[in-house]
């Protein structure tokens, strides 16, 4: 009988995009002893103990009777948890590395400073040879609200605060932070939103957050607030966001994530003068780190040890 540490796992990887293919190639190199399959096949499905994927369409998990782990190759596992037939007993993990928060902080700081210091105006002036000084705004009088102060949000909060901005956070569970003012839960949301000059969404996409940023929520945000979404497109009702910007209740938005990705060419977000679209590129755990983490989690699964970056299936993050 094999010891837990050398239990033979069969991993199913659904090669839905180049993003997954890169991780597939790395896993094959790093763990040649693993059996890795890329599609369902009669006679093989009973062997599959783990999924390593970004998206999991409904209809697959139910055909894998011995599935124990569904690991996301990305930082969010919403693409796996959306499968309605994923048994509650299957453990779900997401990918993370030490630099994820740092990359996200760079993205958010880039978007805030671009607007705060008037970069589009300066670029126009540069193009036309126009020497016109812009006023230097006072960051201490500008409040940045961060929805979701987790793995990435906490690093973003520190980076933004280090530039002099007032930073407030919104979380699900109450917490006692010394260096950050935290609002928690639905009751505190209107008060949190009413203070924000910049609103940064870094929430996970779950049953509680899907579509939560809608017309009614946007109407409680401070007028003229600038919105940054680097989390998941499904958290925002996109038509409502567009209407709120066109009504000038929000001053604009930087959007990295969308309901449908790649963002269709026909989307009104492209080219909108008050919106900056970026192609889901704010932050990404490094391929090697993601694959090492998965291999380690297979070992831990066999050994009965706690998994790295395991999600709470009840909360969805
Ligand atoms: P975490 O899971 O580490 O943190 C989630 C945070 O959101 C926590 O503070 C949590 O509160 C809060 N939260 C969750 N649900 C609710 C709720 N219902 N109400 C209020 N607060 C809630 O997430 P990450 O920081 O790792 O990721 C954040 C988002 O960014 C995810 O959507 C992820 O997929 C996305 N992402 C996007 C990338 C990109 O390139 N665009 C790259 C990396 C991540 P509490 O502290 O109370 O638990």
Image: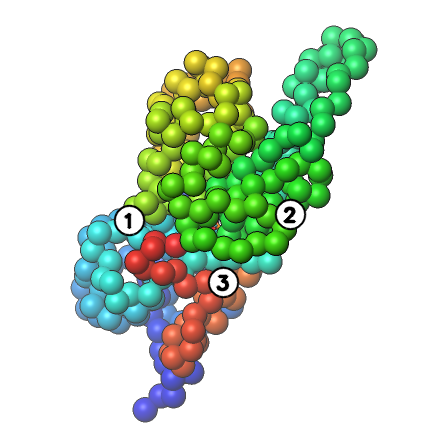
Q: CA distance from mark 2 to mark 1?
A: 32 Å
Is residue 31 something that shows in the picture?
Answer: no
Side of 190 where 210 appears, left or right: left
Q: CA distance from mark 3 to mark 1?
A: 23 Å
At a point 54% along the width and 31% down the height, the residue shown is 196
Residue of label 2: 158
Residue 91 is tagged as none
Q: Is residue 252 above or below residue 57?
A: above
Colour basis: rainbow
Helix, strand or loop under label 2: helix
Q: Residue furthest bottom?
A: 1
Residue 82 is tagged as 1
Q: Nearer the viewer, mark 2 or mark 3?
A: 2
At a point 35% along the width and 88% down the height, the residue shown is 2
Q: Do tag 2 and tag 3 residues touch (Cβ < 8 Å)?
A: no
Side of 67 where 118 appears, left or right: right
Q: CA distance from mark 2 to mark 3?
A: 28 Å
At a point 32% along the width and 91% down the height, the residue shown is 1
Q: Which corner quadrant of the image does residue 130 belong to?
A: top right
Callout 3: CB less than 8 Å from ligand 1:
no
**Residue 282: % across, % down:** 55, 41
Callout 1: CB less than 8 Å from ligand 1:
no
Q: Which corner quadrant of the image does residue 289 belong to?
A: bottom right
Q: Is residue 254 above or below residue 249?
A: below
At a point 40% along the width and 81% down the height, the residue shown is 303
**Quadrant in which the C terminus appears:** bottom left
Q: Nearer the viewer, mark 3 or mark 1?
A: 1
Which sits earlier in the primary sequence, circle 2 or circle 3?
Answer: 2
**Residue 209: % across, % down:** 35, 42
Residue of label 3: 291
Q: Residue furthest right?
A: 131
């Amino acid at each position: 009988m094999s010891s837990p540490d050398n239990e033979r796992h069969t991993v199913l990887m659904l090669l839905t995009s180049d993003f997954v293919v890169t991780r597939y190639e790395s896993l094959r190199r790093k763990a040649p002893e693993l059996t890795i399959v890329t599609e369902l096949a009669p006679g093989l499905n009973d062997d599959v103990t783990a999924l390593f994927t970004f998206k999991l369409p409904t209809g697959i998990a139910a055909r894998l009777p011995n599935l124990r782990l569904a690991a996301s190759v990305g930082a969010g596992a919403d693409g796996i948890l959306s499968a309605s037939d994923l048994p509650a007993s299957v453990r779900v993990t997401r990918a993370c590395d030490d630099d994820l928060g740092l990359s996200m902080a760079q993205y958010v700081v880039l978007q805030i400073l671009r607007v705060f210091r008037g970069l589009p105006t300066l670029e126009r002036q540069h193009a036309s040879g126009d020497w016109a000084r812009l006023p230097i705004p006072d960051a201490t009088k500008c409040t940045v609200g961060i929805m979701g102060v987790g793995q990435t949000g906490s690093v973003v909060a520190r980076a933004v605060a280090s530039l002099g901005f007032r930073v407030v956070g919104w979380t699900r569970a109450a917490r006692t932070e010394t260096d950050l003012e935290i609002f928690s839960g639905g009751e505190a949301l209107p008060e949190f939103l009413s203070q924000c000059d910049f609103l940064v969404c870094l929430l996970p996409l779950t049953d509680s957050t899907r579509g939560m940023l809608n017309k009614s929520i946007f109407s409680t945000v401070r007028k003229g607030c600038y919105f940054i979404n680097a989390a998941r497109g499904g958290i925002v009702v996109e038509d409502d966001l567009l209407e709120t910007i066109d009504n000038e209740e929000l001053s604009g938005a930087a959007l990295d994530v969308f309901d449908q990705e790649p963002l269709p060419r026909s989307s009104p977000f492209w080219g909108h003068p008050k919106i900056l679209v970026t192609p889901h590129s704010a932050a990404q755990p490094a391929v090697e780190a993601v694959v090492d983490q998965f291999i380690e989690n297979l070992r831990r699964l066999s050994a009965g040890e706690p998994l790295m970056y395991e999600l709470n299936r009840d909360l969805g993050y």
